[in-house]
Amino acid sequence: MFKIQEIREIIKLVDSSSIDEFVYEVDGAKVKLKKNNIVVTETVAPKKEVVAPVVQQSAPAAAPAKVEEAPTAAAPAINDPSLHKIVSPMVGTFYQSPNPDSPAYVKAGDKVGNETIVCIVEAMKLFNEIEAEVQGEIVEVLVKDGELVEYGQPLFLVKAQ
């Protein structure tokens, strides 16, 4: 059985994330949350309309160009079969460091071993250390610090040795 505070925490996490649907089941108790898809669609449409006028201005034009290039560059890297993906073993919040004042466990270019801790995924106040489980070099960090992640979502790309 879930405590009301746990349910409130889950609602806050789902509400602040980009996911539209969340299902969590433990010991026969089940929580299922859905966001209103219409609201998400409505917020996407104005972004497209706003980009066109901004591109015409000289100063802000650089920012949209960078934003558009980033997903294009990342997409082929994620699909590169030669790179190993470190994925989230659970739904939770991704943290790059053990606390806000500490440096990130790993960053792009760092060498990792099988048991190297690469991040923490917090789920219901439990902080789970995620290990690389592969030896190699971190090519890319795919998730931002504090972002909600889903089960099986790629977190890092590693060039395995």
Image (cartoon, rainbow, N blue to C red):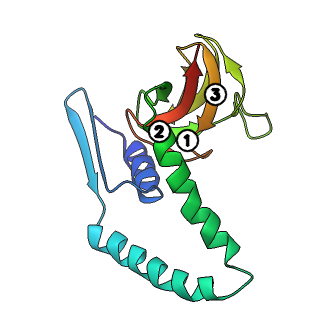
Pointer 1 with pointer 2, Cβ within 8 A: yes
Query: Marks 1 and 2: which is nearer the front?
Result: 2
Lower sequence index among marks 2 and 3: 2
Which element is circle 1 on?
loop
Residues at badges 3 and 1 in contact (C-beta under 8 Å)? no
In the image, is residue 151 above or below residue 39? above
Q: Residue 93's x, y, as percent?
A: 52, 41
Q: CA distance from mark 2 to mark 3?
A: 13 Å
| Residue position for label 1 | 142
User: What kind of residue is marked 2?
Assistant: Ile
Q: Label for residue 78?
A: 2
- 52 relative to 98, above or below: below
Packing grade of label 3 (10 A; few <14, some 14-19, many >=20) is: many
Task: Kindly identify which residue carries mark 3.
Answer: 138
Q: Residue at point 70% right, 28% down? A: 105
- Secondary structure beneath dot 3 equals strand
Q: Are marks 2 and 3 in contact (CB under 8 Å)?
A: no
Residue 7 image position (x, y, % from top left): 37, 47
Q: Amino acid at mark 3?
A: Ile
Residue at image coords 36%, 40%: 3
Alpha-carbon span between mark 1 and mark 2: 9 Å
